[in-house]
Image (cartoon, grey):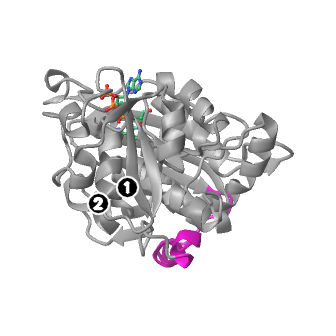
Amino acid sequence: MIPVGILGATGMVGQRFVQLLENHPWFEVKHVIASPASAGKSYKDAVAGRWHMPKDMPEDVKDLIVRPVDDVKGAGKNCRFVFSALDSDIAKDWEEKYAEAGIPVVSNSSAHRHTDDVPMLIPEINHNHTDMIPIQKKNRGWQGFIVVKPNCSLQSYMTPLFALHRKFQLKKAVITTMQSVSGAGHPGVSSFDIIDNIIPYISGEELKSEVEPKKILGRIEGSKFVHDNSFEISAHCNRVGTVDGHMACVSVEFETRPEREEILKIWKEFRSLPQQLKLPSAPEQPIIYREEENRPQTRLDRDAGKGMAVTVGRLRECNVLQWRFAGLSHNTIRGAAGGGILNAELLKAKGYLN
Ligand code: NAP
């Protein structure tokens, strides 16, 4: 078993890491890190009254003592790599310090998503972007490295778009998201603000939705990533009063117009390296198409493929662009901790965590 640490282990995403890593066949949580307010307490005391996961806290983690983030040496002794679910404000510097100290960082925070030599991975899409890791280590003189995953809402549409982009070349998309409250962490949006309400603003989210896909579909040139600027996305991001699961309504146009049957066949048959390698967290079917006219629905479909699949539905012609559909994914599983764990599994399978 590979011993792992979690930076930000007490937060919404950190708790999801703890829950998903229970009984993981490769990784075992040995080190938990959080803010000075939590440091020094047992994990169970640090999250007392704010454990949000649907299953009880794993026994193995309850008595781990929460460490302060500046105990980089301690992390180096206790674990081979760390997952990061730190607040983005502090993640940048600390993730760099861990990587510098020789501890690979598999991050969920947005801090390094736009760093030129940091891969932003969705393993079904750009698994070859791990080729940047040796370049990043050389650029920085680090023994460790940083990889990140993209913003949580992207997972609801990026894989379905990518599956089609490979054949038809994405040209433009207009995307409206309806994002759950867990996406804002805990306590996040106050109940008074979100019950009986939709908030048409999530700070920074629209820019992330428009720019991150260009890096994900981009390429390595020399010592940095170059964006794919051959397409444009216009995003509207809304916070809605659901607990988990981000829904996206997508209108899209490709250079070559696909036929409906082609789209459905491509989505149904889409598989990639995580499925070929049988990575433990890879969903058998990454894209699930629901034929019912009223699916996907957040409550009914967010847990598809153990929360790692994307559920799409309502494929129909668009009067303005070519096609439109709805996509849904679980924001704290595929969109956060589960996506981070799949990244780590890919890295292990490729020998980067030895
Ligand atoms: P959260 O619930 O607010 O948790 C933040 C975590 O950071 C907690 O463990 C907190 O520890 C820790 N922390 C805060 N200040 C610290 C400090 N000075 N030193 C060390 N640790 C500190 O936030 P979240 O929703 O889990 O999000 C975590 C990260 O994941 C963010 O960067 C976010 O953008 C990203 N993300 C979130 C989602 C989602 O759906 N929620 C999806 C994708 C990515 P204490 O508990 O001790 O305060």
Coordinates of residue 354 in the picture (x, y in percent): 62, 60
Identify which residue, 286 or 345, lies in the foreground.
Answer: 345
Q: Is mark 2 within 8 Å of ligand 1?
A: no
Residue appearing at x 52%, y 54% in the figure: 158
Q: Which mark is residue 296?
A: 2
- Residue 30 visible somewhere in the drawing: yes
Dividing the picture into quadrants, the one containing residue 297 is bottom left
Q: Which residues are magenta?
A: 254-277
Q: Is mark 1 within 8 Å of ligand 1?
A: no
Relative to 27, residue 152 above or below:
above
Q: Which residue is mark 1?
A: 326
Give the side of residue 216 with respect to residue 5, left or right: right
Q: Secondary structure at mark 2?
A: loop
Residue appearing at x 60%, y 59% in the figure: 347
Question: Which is more N-terminal, label 1 or label 2?
Answer: 2
Coordinates of residue 149 in the picture (x, y in percent): 53, 46
Q: Which mark is residue 50?
A: none
Coordinates of residue 260 in the picture (x, y in percent): 49, 72
| Residue 265 falls within the magenta-colored stretch | yes
Q: Secondary structure at mark 1?
A: strand
Give the side of residue 25 with respect to residue 89, left or right: left
